[in-house]
Structures are given as C-alpha cells and as structure tokens.
C-alpha cells in the first residue's frame, strides 16, 4: 500500500493497518453508490442488489473517472459513467462494452478492492490485507447483544487530527467549562486525579468518572451519574451512561487524512427506551459543535506524543496513557513544538 506524496510523517501507512468506518449502513441502500475518503484515498462504496456492501478505489482504470458518479448495474457491479465499464466487489473488470463479448478483458483493467465488513450500523473497510492488519475490526458487543436498539448518528467532519478528536471525547475536565449550556455543571470545575486502567495487552484503556450532570433537554438536575469510558487503541471509544441509564455511545472517528476526520457515532439504548430521534440529534449537535470548534483550533495540529511537549496534571491521566499507547504502536509526531517555541513542561502527578 503506497501513500506517495502524502506528507503525514508515516501516519497514513500505519493507520491503514486498522479498520475504519467509511459510511453509515443506512446511507447505502441496495443498488446505491456513494463516495468516501479514507487516509487521502478516494473510495467508492456500493451495495449490490442482494445487499452486500463493497469498497474499491474510486478511480476507473480507463480514464480516471470517479466510479462514485456511476451506478449499480443489473449484475450488481459498479458501472463507470463515462464508458460503461463494470467492476465487481473484488475489483475485477467484468465488462468493457467497447470490446464486445468475444475479446478478452485485460487484467490491467482491474481496480483495487478492499475488505469490507458491517457492524453497529456502519460499513467498515481496511486498506491492507489480513496479513498486514494490526487489529481485527473493532466490535462493540452491546450493539449485537439483543438487549439494545441502535441510533446511528449524523456524521461530523472535523478539521482536526483523529487523535485530537479521540482525546477530546475522553477529556472530562472540560465538561464544567465548555458544556455548561447542555449537560455540564459549572459548580464542579475542581477535579481529583483520574485512575486509568490499562489492559495487560496494552490495547484497552478504561476509567469511570462520577459526575453530577444536568439534563440537556430541559436543564433539570443535577443528577448523579457515572461516565464509563472504554477506549480501544487507537481509534474507538465506548461511553456508557452519557445518554441515559444503560445507554452506550460508541464513536469511531475515521481519518479522512492525517489532519481531517469524519466522526461516526452510534448510541445503543436499552430496549423499551423511548427517544425522540430529532431531539436527540439536536442535543448531540449542541454538544459536538463547541468540541469541534475547540479541537479544530488546537496547536500543534498533531497530538504531541512526547509527554514533555505539553503540561499534564493528575486529571489528565487518560491523555497521558493514550499518548503513551499511541507512541508504543509506532505513531510519531516528528518536530512537534509549542507555538511560542518554548520548551513545554512535563507531566505532573
């Protein structure tokens, strides 16, 4: 897999070895085509008429036309809108109308296809083969347990690195400052140290955060809650309790590039829970938007993995554990510096 010309300090090459969502399942009906971008690679996502999802390069091998501008033919192949060439889910060119049926199709006509999987209302893909992937596709058991129903949220594009978005989602210290107009409690700005559990294999980080939160729909409260964070490195998080008792919000921010992220999220609600979907989406929009604005303006753009680059206090222990985990995986941010050029203080506590 090559990412020549992409200046990302090796981020894309390493990130490509993990699974990422590229579309909401509901947005790709049988016979429908859509486009996606993952790690600076343009992809076409479609379903054949039997409902099977496929992902290949969004680039016809003939004249460089976007296959996502085409349609799904009666045989389930994606069809180029320019000359009508057809490609199946394995990337094989199955028909070149200009050749008729008697002449063979050159194998150079094939396009690159990628492994595809569906889980939690999302279509996932991996840009490398199974022998190169570092982790199997993330799985949130609650979404398939038969005990919850799923709300698949609207996607949000962030002008920010994916690691910045994940760290923001797990940063509980900003609740009582940035989100006082929704669920945050302005009287609880003082914080104790956070204890973070790291799994034996190093892939999972978890912590629980008791918090007296307000109801963002009507301002009632505060109510004693426990936010239970379960992070699987490097890209996914499950948060229990934030959207009501027994709820589990799962996020999977997908790196469109090294510095741009598409946030996919779903929330699992216990069966029998009545939720107004439009109202819930509006509440989440009011929460996501200030986060997106803050994270999009953070400097440096890339999350500093050298712990001496930024100040860390006892309530930042999740950030410290997350950055250490990313560094252990091989992610780097060469040359990261504070904007003012001064040496940054190290972690405390």
Image: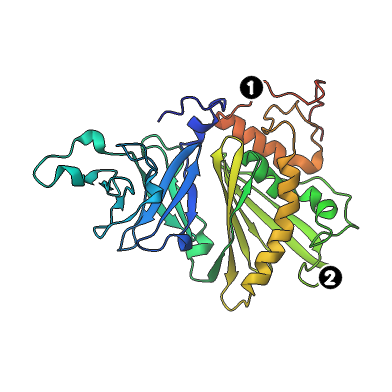
Asked if residue 241 shows in the view, the reply is: yes
Residue tagged by mark 2? 221
Splitting the image into 4 quarters, where does residue 111 fall? top left
| 30 w.r.t. 108: above or below | below
Q: Is residue 319 left or right of residue 77?
A: right
Q: For residue 289, which numbered disc appears in the image?
A: none
Q: Nearer the viewer, residue 184 or 40?
A: 40
> Relative to the observer, which residue lies in front, 39 or 140?
39
**Place of residue 120 in the rendered image (x, y in percent of width and height, measured from the top left):** 49, 60
Circle 2 Cα neighbour tier, 10 Å, few/some/many (<14 / 14–19 / ≥20) = few
Depth-wise, is mark 2 or mark 1 nearer the camera?
1
Q: CA distance from mark 2 to mark 1?
A: 46 Å
Q: Earlier in the sequence, mark 2 or mark 1?
A: 2
Above or below residue 233? Residue 153 is below
Task: Name the image quarter holding the C terminus.
Answer: top right
Residue 336: x %, y % from top left? 70, 24
Q: Element type at marker 1?
A: loop
> Label 1: how many residues lie within 10 Å, few (<14), some (14-19) or many (20+)?
few
* Residue 233 coordinates in the image, percent (x, y): 57, 42
- Name the side, left or right, on which 314 lies relative to 305: right
Q: Which residue is mark 1?
A: 334
Residue at (74%, 40%) from the top-left corner?
Answer: 317
Q: At x 61% / y 36%, what residue is drawn? A: 259
Helix, strand or loop status at disc 2 = loop
Could you tell me residue 254's position as x and y percent?
Answer: 55, 45
Vertical placement of residue 148 versus 332, above or below: below
């Amino acid at each position: 897999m090559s990412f020549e010309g992409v200046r990302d300090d090796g981020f894309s090459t390493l990130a490509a070895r993990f699974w990422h969502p590229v579309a909401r399942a509901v947005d790709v009906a049988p016979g429908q085509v859509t486009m996606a971008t993952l790690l600076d690679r343009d992809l076409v996502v479609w379903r054949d008429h039997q409902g099977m999802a496929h992902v290949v390069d969004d680039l016809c091998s003939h004249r460089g036309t976007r296959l996502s501008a085409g349609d799904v033919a009666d045989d389930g192949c994606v069809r180029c809108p320019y000359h009508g060439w057809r490609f199946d889910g394995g990337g094989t060119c199955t028909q070149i109308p200009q050749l008729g049926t008697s002449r063979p199709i050159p194998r150079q006509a094939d396009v690159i296809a990628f492994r595809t999987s569906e889980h939690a209302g999302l279509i996932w893909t991996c840009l490398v083969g199974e022998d190169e992937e570092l982790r199997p596709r993330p799985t949130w058991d609650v979404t398939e347990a038969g005990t919850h129903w799923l709300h698949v949220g609207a996607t949000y594009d962030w002008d920010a690195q994916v690691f910045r978005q994940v760290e923001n989602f797990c940063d509980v210290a900003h609740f009582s400052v940035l989100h006082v107009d929704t669920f945050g409690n302005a009287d609880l700005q003082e914080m104790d140290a956070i204890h973070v559990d790291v799994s034996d294999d190093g892939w999972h980080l978890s912590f629980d955060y008791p918090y007296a939160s307000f109801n963002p729909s009507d301002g009632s409260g505060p109510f004693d809650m426990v936010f239970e964070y379960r992070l699987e490195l490097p890209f996914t998080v499950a948060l229990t309790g934030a959207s009501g008792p027994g709820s589990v919000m799962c996020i999977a921010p997908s790196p469109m590039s090294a510095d741009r992220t598409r946030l996919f999220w779903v929330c699992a609600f216990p069966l029998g829970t009545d939720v107004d979907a439009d109202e819930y989406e509006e509440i989440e929009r009011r929460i996501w938007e200030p986060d997106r604005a803050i994270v999009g303006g953070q400097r440096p753009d890339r999350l500093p993995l050298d712990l001496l680059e930024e100040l860390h206090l006892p309530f930042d222990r999740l950030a410290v554990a997350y950055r250490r985990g990313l560094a252990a995986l091989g992610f780097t941010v060469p040359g990261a510096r504070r904007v003012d050029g001064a040496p940054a203080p190290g972690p405390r506590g």
